[in-house]
Amino acid sequence: MAWGLVTVLRNRNARFYLTGVIVSGFGDSAMSLAAGVWVKELTGSSSLAALVSVCVWAPALMGPVIGTLADRVRRRPLLIATSLVLAAIMTAPLAVRSRDDVWLLFAVLTLVGVGAVLTDAAETALVASAVPGELRGDFNGLVRTAIESTKLLGPLAGAALFTVLGGPTVAALDAVTFALAALAFCLIRVREPAPTKRPVRNWWTETAVGLSCLWRHRTLRPLVLVGGCAMTASGLRSTATYALIDTGLHRPAALAGVIALVQGIGSVISGLTAGALLRRLSARRVSAIGLTICALGSLAWAIPWLPVVLGGSLAMGLGLPWPLISAMTSVQTETPGHLLGRVAASANTLIFAPTGLALLLGTAMVATLDYRVQLLSAAALALGAAALLVGTDFATRFKGPSNAGTGPSTDAASRTVARDDAGR
């Protein structure tokens, strides 16, 4: 494990990319918390404050459409330009002063959500060119660790800055972090091939090609689908947090901070170990192990004893990133380069968009049912997804070698889609 992580950190492109992710992620995490508090303070409305998260997450539903742009241009210049545009956009909240200005905050956060979808697609595609294939598992694990670390520290900084200096200061911080991320991306050295010349098609047709490639790929489809199951289970479980604390543990709501911290520690450990696991086991097995650990964590939450609950939180933090890292590493490895932006954006949508639906469903369940019903449902979903992966892995072994390798995909369907898109 240590060798892989050290090798990644010695890679110039990996270092600067990670720097950009950490810096921009820190600013986004700080702003995401401060924006909700800001709206609540200006309007007094909890529902409007909750709308902040909707604005940021809603663009993910259009991921396949937005991600098409990442296949039409070179990815590094796109990343730099998008980061600079977002830096400029984040200066708009400096004008927010009263309840009448809240619409501006919602508009800015929606644009930031669109930018996040686009940068995710461009970053995933750029990594395939900038980071050697044998390091991508370790690299993606470090990226996940960086993201989880910023989620732990960013909200604390955002809350402190908002309390002392107000919302405009947090917005200015986020703008600066976008600019610094653009600088870090400028320092990445990579030779990107010119975008493939294809027959002129409308945007929707090109989007459909990316979705088709993902859906017809024997290796990627199950990994992406179970990644969505993992996030759905996580959403169901997270909505049970306060009911668990109140009804199950009879503790104050502030305990949620401790639970989140323990889960975050598990996620950091998970990211640091993912690369070593992917070198030893197939992506399907790593995903199945992570899902099983998540299920055990959900079951532990059903036992109203604090040490067991904290152990379950650590398990959930440890298990959840592995299906996500396995899926995205496989997307980078298995997808033809000229389709990677669209396929990556489609994969992100299928993995992360169900979270919003799970949160809505979980909110309804916690209002009408015992919170343990949610936890058992989350555990059953995670175990079912793990069983699906194990079953497809065994089926592949009986049928012969799969197309899951370290080089470009050999799957016939993917090659057909790639040829069609290139106009050959």
Image (tube, rainbow, N blue to C red):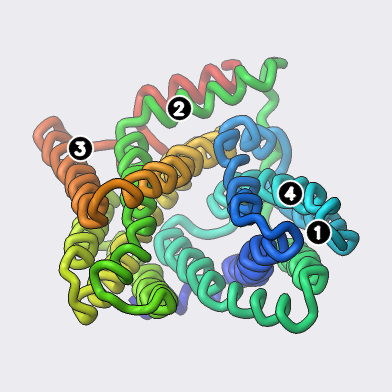
Label 4 packing within 10 angstroms: few (<14), some (14-19), many (20+): many
The residue at which mark 1 appears reads as 90
Specify the amino acid type for callout 1: Met
Residue occupying image coordinates x 77% and y 46%: 107
SS state under label 1: loop
Q: Is residue 177 in view from this perspective?
A: yes
Label 1 packing within 10 angstroms: few (<14), some (14-19), many (20+): many
Q: Nearer the viewer, mark 1 or mark 2?
A: 1
Q: Is residue 180 left or right of residue 278?
A: right
The residue at which mark 4 appears reads as 106
Specify the amino acid type for callout 4: Phe
Up-down: is 75 above or below 181?
A: above
Q: Which is nearer the N-term, disc 3 or disc 1?
A: 1
SS state under label 4: helix
The residue at which mark 3 appears reads as 401
Give the Cα distance between marks 1 and 4: 11 Å
The residue at which mark 2 appears reads as 213
SS state under label 3: loop
Q: Which is nearer the N-term, disc 1 or disc 2?
A: 1
Q: Nearer the viewer, mark 2 or mark 4?
A: 4
Give the Cα distance between marks 1 and 2: 35 Å
Q: Is residue 132 left or right of residue 316?
A: right
Would you identify the image quadrant in which residue 399 lies? top left
Label 3 packing within 10 angstroms: few (<14), some (14-19), many (20+): few
Q: Is residue 166 left or right of residue 40?
A: right
Measured from the top left, where is residue 309 in percent x and y?
A: 24, 73
Give the Cα distance between marks 2 and 4: 34 Å
- Residue at the left extreme? 398
Q: Is residue 269 in view from this perspective?
A: no
Specify the amino acid type for callout 3: Pro
